[in-house]
Amino acid sequence: MFHIKFLFDLKGFDVSTLETSEPLILKGPTDEILLTISKAAPWSATQLRAIDFEALLGDEFDVCDAYLGSNWIGSTEI
């Protein structure tokens, strides 16, 4: 099952990183871009948790990193 663990779910994460409307970018193990989601308003933790990444990417990708713009915010490897 495809599951991204976000850094904001870990103690001590600076949630101000979410105060951006930078696109959400998922990158594969060789830094290839798997998915980009643009948004006009800032992201929230609730919105990011609600995304069904498996439905968007299928089950062929099981390793990826999540970024808001250039800020790393999560991974399937955490």
Image (tube, rainbow, N blue to C red):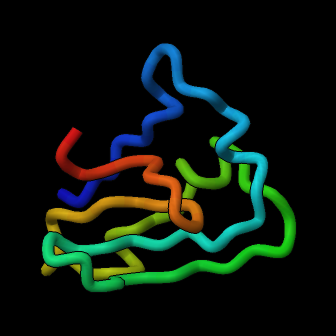
Rendered location of residue 57, percent (x, y): 32, 81
The N terminus sits in image quarter: bottom left
In front of the other: 54 or 22: 22
Rendered location of residue 71, percent (x, y): 52, 55
Q: Is residue 53 left or right of residue 14?
A: left
The C terminus sits in image quarter: top left
Kindly give the residue lying farthest to the front in the view shown.
70
Q: Is residue 6 left or right of residue 70?
A: left
The answer to whether residue 78 is above or below residue 72 is: above
Q: Is residue 44 left or right of residue 61?
A: right
The answer to whether residue 7 is above or below residue 69 is: above
In front of the other: 35 or 73: 73
Q: Is residue 37 left or right of residue 2?
A: right
The answer to whether residue 13 is above or below residue 43 is: above
- Numbered label tally: 0
Say which residue appears at 86% left-offset and 65% top-offset: 41
Quarter of image, res 10: top left
Say which residue appears at 38% left-offset and 76% top-offset: 55
Say which residue appears at 26% left-offset and 84% top-offset: 32
Rendered location of residue 73, percent (x, y): 46, 48
Kindly give the residue lying farthest to the top in the view shown.
11
Rendered location of residue 29, percent (x, y): 15, 70
Say which residue appears at 39% left-offset and 71% top-offset: 26
